Amino acid sequence: DNRNVARMALLLAGLPERVAGVTVNRLCASGLNAVNQAARAIACGEGEVFVAGGVESMTRAPYSLPKNPVGFGPSGNVTAWDTTLGWRYPNPALEALFPLEAMGETAENIYEMSCAGNVSGGEITREEQDRFALQSQERAVAAINAGHFADEIVPVAIPQRRGDPLIVDTDEHPRYRKTAQGYVVDSSLDDLARLRPAFRKGGTVTAGNASGLNDGACALVVMSGAKAEDLGIKPLARWVGSAAAGVDPRVMGLGPVNATRKALQRAGLTIEDIDLAELNEAFAVQALAVLRELHLSEAITNVNGGAIALGHPLGCSGARILTTLIHEMQRRAAEGQSMRYGLATL
């Protein structure tokens, strides 16, 4: 939440002062957009090596107080905006065009779209949303037990008043409990069914089938092929293309549909060419709607769980899903599976 967090991060990381830092603010898409900007800069000959990623601390996001619109105007009540999530300082002209709805309400709007037959496959029921949410938890816990995230996570040491520092090297958000045999999912369909709608009376979106608010940071090194060859570095993956698309803000979670279609078209690919995919799970209903509209199989999407289990630290998430995608493709390729094209979308 400080000024130009990218510049501060690189200085704290010990990079030379001559290295510039650019902060991208595209909310949930920031981390992935940073990677795409780096790749485009390389393609344009404006650099050879970039560090791109994103960060978010939702547990420490501050409250924001507006200034008085009149320099020495009358005193009165002040609205404090929570900068963790959602609208703040809305422009009245924009509010006249679109209802300024909470993110959870936009998910409920997608549910209503599905009931009206405007989403492939018809109604996305509460039961289906809960099933998808539990699947995310199960996949995440299985991935943790299998050590699939070990190569992705940099352990963080937290100093303690006494004794050794606390080492955080495992995602904290999944609903699990630790046993002698490892982690087990600490949730069930019955547990999820008991949760009340969180955003709309009679709705379907609950705390259990929505992504969590948490902290996270992720960074990737993006490098030209020529530079990698000069340095003797074997790339983990090749950047093929990207796209962004705008949609009605009332159903903002459907953005990955048009963005993915544009990206595939630019790359000369189809959805059938995708071997593995990572789709940000802001809400189960939103993720299911995107999967249906794209005809993207759950079997190859978020195979290690998604944001419902792992959490959705906004600026970090795009870079995180790309990192997870690349590592899983590497793992499967090493096992002999054909892994050529992957998709990261949010």
Image: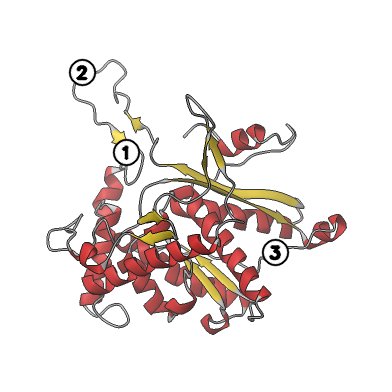
Q: Which residue is mark 3?
A: 236
Placement of 275 over or under 83, stated as above or below: below
Q: Which mark is residue 89?
A: 1
Mark 1 crowd level (few <14, some 14–19, many ≥20, 10 Å Cα): few
Helix, strand or loop status at disc 3: loop
Q: Give the amino acid at mark 1.
A: Tyr
3D distance between C-alphas at marks 2 and 3: 58 Å
What percent of the width, then of the height, locates residue 345? 49, 65
Label 1's element? Answer: loop
Secondary structure category for the residue under label 2 = loop
Q: Is residue 135 left or right of residue 160?
A: left
| Amino acid of disc 2 | Ser
Disc 2: which residue: 75
Give me the residue at 39% from left, 67% from top.
Answer: 138
> At x 27% / y 78%, what residue is drawn?
118
Q: Above or below — where is 116 with respect to 313?
A: below
Q: Residues within 10 Å of mark 3 (few under 14, many from 20)?
A: few
Q: Depth check: 266 or 137 in front?
A: 137
- Earlier along the polypeptide chain: callout 2 or callout 1? 2
- What residue appears at the point 33 percent right and 67 percent down from the top-left corner? 134
Amino acid carrying mark 3 in the image: Leu
Q: Earlier in the sequence, mark 2 or mark 3?
A: 2
The part of the image, by quadrant, that contains residue 297 is bottom left
Residue 135: % across, % down: 37, 70
